[in-house]
Each structure stands twice: as C-alpha cells, then as structure tokens.
Image (spheres, helix red, strand yellow):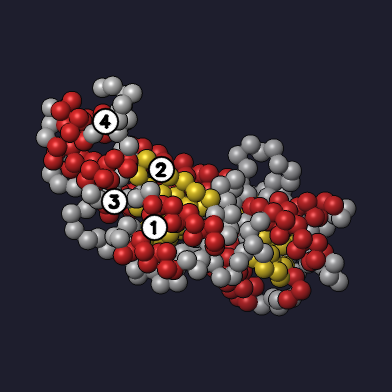
Amino acid sequence: MNKQKPVRLRDLAFELNLSVSTVSRAMSGKGRISEKTRMRVLQAIKQSSYTPNDVARSLRMQNAMSLGIIVTDITNSFFGSVIKGAQDVSRKMGYSILLSNSDENALYEAEAMQLMLEKQVSGLILASVGNNFSKIDQFKHLNIPVVFIDNTPESQAEFDSVSADNHKAAYCLTTRLIEKGYREIGMITGPLNQSSGRQRYEGFLSAMKEHGFPLRNEWIREGDFQLESGRALMYDILKTNPPPRAMIISNNYMTYGAVRAIKETGKTIPDDLALASFDTDDPTSLSSPTIASMNQPAVEIGTKAAEILINRLSAKQALPHANLILEPVFTDGNSW
C-alpha cells in the first residue's frame, strides 16, 4: 500500500481481498470473524495511513481500537508499571493507547477525560482524583466502559475496578512495626477522600486499636501523595514533643520527601525514627536506607484492567461488573 496518501476503508478491503463489512467487523471486534482474518486487517492498518478517526467516521461508531489511560502522576514508577501492564495486553490485542496525566488535579483530570471522549477511545482506565462524576456519566451514557484503578468509587456495583487490598496492606505494615517493638507510631496519610488514602489510614487504625495503643493526633497528618507534602508534614511531626518513634507513610513520593526532612534535621533512620511505606520497592538496591514497603502489584493491575476492558468490548452480551482486589507484596528494608 502507498503510505503517502490517505487510505480509505474500501481501499483496505480491496487490498486484502475482503469485503468492506468484514474489514469493519475486524476493526470493531464485533461479529463473527476468524482470528487470522482479524490479525490480517489489524496488521494492514498498522502498515497504512488509515487513522483511528477514519475508522470512527467510516464505521460510524466509537470503537477505534484504542484505550485511554489517565493517571495522577506519570513520573511515579507505580503508574509507569501500571501503564506497561496495560500496554502489553493492548498491543497483543491490536489496541493502541492514549495516555494522559492529571497531576492529582481534578480540573486536569476532567480535561483529560474530555480529550478521551473527543478521540473516541473504546474504553478508559482511570486513576481518578475523584469528583468528576458528570464526566464519568458521559462515558456511561455513550457505553464506553471505564475501569477504575488505585482510587475506586464508593459504589462499585456500577463500575469495573482493579486495586490492591489497601486496608490489609496498612494493617499488616502497622502490625509488623508493633511486632518489632514500636509503640509510638504516627502516619502521613494520603487524601482521605480517595479510597487508597482512606483505606490505608483505616488499616493503620485497626492495627493500633487491636493492639491497644493510643493514637496521638499530632503524629497524624493528611498528605496529597506528592513529595513536597511528605517533606513539609514530616518537618511538622518532628517538631512535636515527644516525636514518634516510627512513621507509616502512605505512598512512595511522600516517603522520599519525609526522608529528606529527616536527614535535613540531622536525624537518622531507623535510630531516631523508623519508617515503613507503600510502593517504595527499589529493584536497584541503590537507595539508602531501603524502605520497608507494602507494594501494589502494579503491572498486574494494568494487565487486569486492560483485560477487563477488552473482554467487555468484545463480549456479545453484557458482562457483570468485575471488582478485583489483588494481594499486596511486602519487601523488607533497613528503615526499621
């Protein structure tokens, strides 16, 4: 095919010696068609200048064989791994990926969701900062499936979701600290209006209550999952008298900020203050100290989310909503 000029639907059909309707079914993922034929069509699309917008116009539908992914911080290694998992599945199934970053900002998230609608994505994987219910309703109205990751909605009956067991992760992390002999434990939580932040805080509370240890409100702060938040809040907690002997911090970036604050005040980890966190696993082993951490299976979250979307898009009848809760994975460190 000549890649220098636009290719139309009937051009693809003629080149492949297939009917236009067969090519349409191959691109939409709907209707009876052999896997061999579908792959022939998808390969021809990749080698031509036939674009997703052309697909949408020609088929007069919104399934352009593309999945949208919106994450809160693309620089965070957790989300990088989620994206890798989703892309691995999508690539195998002939879907492309449209990626956007919200920077933990609800306005930016709404703008990204609007972009996904305009680009006519087939489905959306969303790590939401919350509160964009009107935009989510637009996806529902247009029958574009949405899978929530990381921060899941209060009512999951109407949505698909994939997340780690955040309550269990925080409970186990707190219990491990207690078993090591720590009693004066504080926490920097994530945003409590987000499920991951709230569930981790509740897991911490459950473990402290079960072991009969009192909570000190001055040792508990609500952060925003950003590095500077962890640094500033850790400074505040270190000023308390007495300060805690151990801290649980709700994500990797806030932990990195907290470590900076601890070092800048001349204190050492774990001699002056023990730390435990979430998603700070360092495969390079170059970080010092290495942080004891409960980690979400990030690649698996992305993989499962993409599989749910593609299964829903290719199903011939409505599927029940899937709400997967995956087991966290612990990695030890020398931070406690």
For the residue carrying disc 4, how many other residues have a C-alpha within 10 Å: few (<14), some (14-19), or many (20+)? some
Per the model, the C-alpha gap separating discs 3 and 1 is 17 Å
Q: Is residue 125 above or below residue 285?
A: below
| Residue 176 in sight in this render | no
User: Would residue 156 be found to the left or right of residue 78 on screen?
Assistant: left
Single out the mark in the foreground, 2 or 3.
3
Label 4 residue SS? loop
Label 1 residue SS? strand
Q: For mark 2, what is the residue?
A: 97
**What's the residue type where badge 2 is placed?**
Ile
- Where is the N terminus found, in terms of image quarters? top left
Question: Which disc number belongs to residue 7?
Answer: 4
Give the residue at x 38% y 54%: 117
Per the model, the C-alpha gap separating discs 2 and 1 is 14 Å
Q: Nearer the viewer, residue 143 or 201?
A: 143
Give the residue at x 49% y 57%: 111
Q: Is residue 199 above or below residue 38?
A: below
Label 3 residue SS? loop
Per the model, the C-alpha gap separating discs 1 and 4 is 33 Å
User: Would residue 91 be found to the left or right of residue 218 on screen?
Assistant: left
